[in-house]
Amino acid sequence: MDEMQKVENARDTRDMLHKNALFAEERSGEAASEFTRLEVQIATFLFTFSSLFLGSFIKGLSSFSHAEVSAMKWAFACMLFFLIVSLVLGLVHLKRKERFWDEMIHQRIRRWEKWNDASRKRATFEEAEAFHEGAAKGSVSGASPMVFTPNWTWILQTIFLGLGIVLIFAISLIFLFQGGTDIISVLPE
């Protein structure tokens, strides 16, 4: 490869990395937005159902035996716990995604800078190529690179959210079909 081809290749690589850095920046912004939306949606969901069932607990537990009241209170507490754990795991997952894309931005910017130096002849083509390959294998900052965002937080979040919804549904059915209390009379006004 002659010098002109090396400079042209350096420019092409620099431009490609710039495009990828812009994409990574966009994804990071999307992850941050998802983080905020998820937090608001789950918090709203959690507090809506908490207030709905709080009124039911105050007015509607008198027709249940002591053991049933204890079971209902534990089910309600578990429902709140599952929803809170789901919220926390969802937020952790989204923050990890955001961190992944932030690392991609930093890595791509550093590689772009090196290719830019090569295209302006402040660094050799070989130096830029070696830096590019080294940065692709490991993080530029010295920490081990995050290759992908693990799914375990998302899977656990989904499981806990599902368990919380199942408990909400079960408690709703119990109050709906219990004798002597009309469900409309125990809903908050």
Image (cartoon, helix red, strand yellow):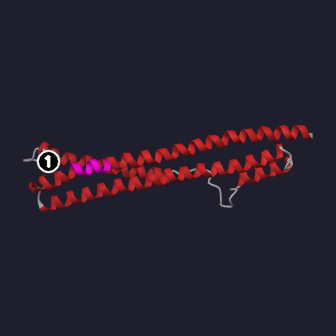
List x then y, in percent, for residue 6: 87, 41
The reply, left or right, for residue 148 in relation to residue 83 is right
The reply, left or right, for residue 135 in relation to residue 3 is left
Graded by Cα atoms within 10 Å as few (under 14), some (14 to 19) or many (20 or more), the crowding at tag 1 reads many
Range covered by the magenta-colored residues: 45-52
Question: Which part of the image, by quadrant, shows the N terminus?
Answer: top right
Under mark 1, the amino acid is Val
Residue closer to the observer: 99 or 22: 22
Residue 39: within the magenta? Answer: no
To which residue does mark 1 refer?
186
Residue closer to the observer: 111 or 145: 111
**Residue at 17% in and 51% down:** 56
Residue 46: within the magenta? Answer: yes
**Residue at 29% in and 50% down:** 47
Q: How many marks?
A: 1
In which quadrant of the rendered view does residue 24 lie? top right
List x then y, in percent, for residue 147: 63, 51
**Residue at 71% in and 42% down:** 17
Residue closer to the observer: 26 or 77: 26
Single out the residue that lies furthest toward the right.
2
The reply, left or right, for residue 35 in relation to residue 161 is right
Question: Which part of the image, by quadrant, shows the C terminus?
Answer: top left
List x then y, in percent, for residue 157: 42, 51
List x then y, in percent, for residue 176: 16, 44
Task: State the predominant SS element of the stretch in magenta.
Answer: helix
The reply, left or right, for residue 104 in relation to residue 41 is right
Element type where label 1 sits in the image:
helix
**Residue at 65% in and 56% down:** 145
